[in-house]
Amino acid sequence: MISWLKYLIIAFVFTGLAAVLFYFSTQQNSNIRATQEVKSALKSSVVGSLRQNYDDVNINKKDVMSNLILDIVKTQKEHGKAIKIDYVFLNPSGSPTELDSEISSIQFRIELLNSKNEVVSKSVQRITLKGDS
């Protein structure tokens, strides 16, 4: 009789571990998926025209970041968690820059935060806006 009870307890432990693993992996996968959705959404926005005409157009950082943050918020709102967005503009050599004429890409990081403002999931993406970065 004790034998089946031992196996039942082991089964509950494995089921609990599998549930916890499933929860955390699902959260990370949805964050990565949402980050990739932002990248595809930006392809059809103003950034798409910048890529086609990058010789004649200077990048307006405010407009690009407004579009980027708007797309991030749209895709992340389903999580129901607070998000933190960090971004940096990069020049063609991959160094951070603030000069509008040197900007060729944006690198951004999205962090999902729990109720204690601790990072639960993190995703980093780089988007090329113009040139061969």
Image: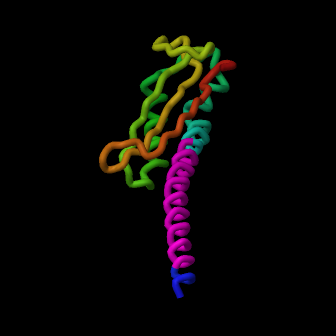
Q: Is residue 3 above or below residue 23?
A: below
Outermost residue, right side: 132
Q: Is residue 9 above or below residue 116?
A: below
Q: Position of residue 2 (x, y in %)?
A: 52, 83
Residue at (47, 38) in percent of width and height: 110
Q: What secondary structure prevails in the magenta region?
A: helix
Q: Is residue 116 left or right of residue 26?
A: left
Q: Is residue 110 above or below residue 20?
A: above
Q: Position of residue 62 (x, y in %)?
A: 42, 25
Residue at (39, 54) in percent of width and height: 80
Residue at (66, 18) in percent of width and height: 131
Q: In the picture, residue 10 is in which quadrant? A: bottom right
Say which of 17 and 44 sits in front: 17
Q: Which residues are magenta?
A: 6-35
Q: Is residue 119 left or right of residue 106?
A: left
Q: Is residue 52 above or below residue 43?
A: above
Q: Position of residue 103 (x, y in %)?
A: 54, 17
Say which of 44 and 74 sits in front: 74
